Amino acid sequence: MAKKSAAIDMTQGSPISLMLRFALPMMIGGVFQNLYHMVDSAVLGRYVGSEALAAIGSSSSTTHMLLMLATSITSAVSIVISQHIGSGNKEKIRSGMVSTIYLTVVVGILLGLISLVAARPLMNLLKTPDNIIDDAVLYIQFIGGFCIVSFTYNSASSILRAIGDSTTPLIFLIICSVLNVILDLVAVIGLNLEVAGVAIATLVSQAISAVLCILYMFKKYPFLRISVSDLKPDMKETFNIFFMGAQMALQSALLSVGMMVITRVINGYGSDVVAAFTVGSNVQNLAAMLFSNFAFGFSVYVGQNWGARNMERIQRGVRDIFLLLGGLTLFATLLSQIFARFLVGLYVNAEEVNVVAASLSFVRIQACFFPFLGWIWLFNSTMKGMGKIPITMASSFVELGSKIGLSILLPILMGSYVGIWYAAPIGWILGILPTAVYYYGGFWKKALKKLIEKDAADKAKAEAAAAAETTAES
């Protein structure tokens, strides 16, 4: 690699020390990423009104689904390339990048077309209130219709993180966030573009950051550069990434369908509760920045050590990060309880009493379950780093079923929309079970041992072939 590289070798050193170095830039990046989402909501809530804020919230499950379908491919790229990094196979890294280019273009265009056509039917299906449906549709068509922009940035960032560089994506995410804040203020306050303004600001800032990130990536890491001769896709590698990405896309789609069902339930309580759900989700995302990236980034650690066939380091890493997440999530819970009213006040004027009360109940209830949120992310990242996507899908099935059933049942039993706020946390707890059983049951160890045996057999076969060739030549 290039001199003064920001890439981190996860196959050596203390897991906690490595994850601190790797995850801290991601954590800072997460704060900035949430910053421009917060600015979107805050600018609309304060300078346009709660209806515009509710429109963004009502469309969030749909835009989340579309974007998660796209980024599932980039997550697969990160897993595959991190495993190649662990095995030291740079040729495979480049073939994975070429596959990413083709998949990004095809999937990005396809999802963009779907967003433009299906936005209004989806909002009607979710029974979006009439006073916010037009803005919700407009927002989906902008963000989803041009999702190839965020897809491209996420692809470049995923490749960099797979090689252990989380600092470079941070730099360009900060640039993106600052641009977004400036463009939000100009578009909404200066040009009076309202919901369309925040969507345009997000897309323009992401596009600029994506171009800069790609140019810098090729300059900083020469071994990532692709020549014309590399552009012929490795179909086996492409299929591997696509198949893995498709499984994660299905997983994301199922979770998003669950969110859509919950959104439909929430919509039935009116725009005040929809706005509260939007505010509560934003506050929760901000608090989760304290621990989420330690869990998400762990897939790179596992991927590199899986590629290096290092079983003991994977075990040590899971144990250490499990304890670290326990402490961080409890701290996030404490901060959320103390500063709940202040954080909610960033989005909603105090005069909107109903929205404030509902938002506070969301934040305070779900914050109590943060440890389980951190742990479900940790075990899912562990399975993803190993390439065991079906296990994470099983976790998602359990979580999804719980969220859908409980979001319908609990409000009836409790006689209030507050029951909805408990559905997701209970889903987190139940969703941990499949991945925990697979991990602590030792099934992954058997799979890794088979790979080690296969590697040894392939090496012996290659050495025998080389010896036979040398004998024949002599």
Image (tube, rainbow, N blue to C red):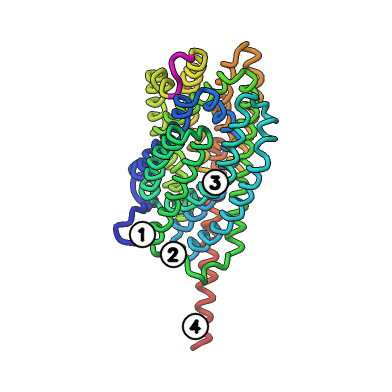
Secondary structure beneath disc 2?
loop
Label pair 3/2, CB-CB below 8 angstroms: no
Amino acid beneath label 3 = Thr
Mark closest to the chain's N terminus, 3 or 4 = 3
Label pair 1/3, CB-CB below 8 angstroms: no
Of circles 4 and 1, which is in front? 1
Secondary structure beneath disc 4?
helix
Find residue 163 and report its horizontal and vertical position in percent.
42, 54
Amino acid beneath label 4 = Thr
Label pair 1/2, CB-CB below 8 angstroms: no
Q: Quadrant of the N terminus?
A: bottom left
Label 1 belongs to which residue?
220
- Residue in front for this viewpoint, 157 or 52: 52
Find residue 62 and report its horizontal and vertical position in percent.
61, 36
Label 2 belongs to which residue?
225
Above or below — where is 186 with respect to 130? below
Q: Quadrant of residue 119?
A: top right
Secondary structure beneath disc 3?
helix
Label 4 belongs to which residue?
470
Label 3 belongs to which residue?
71
Residue at figure coordinates x 49%, y 44% from the top left: 203
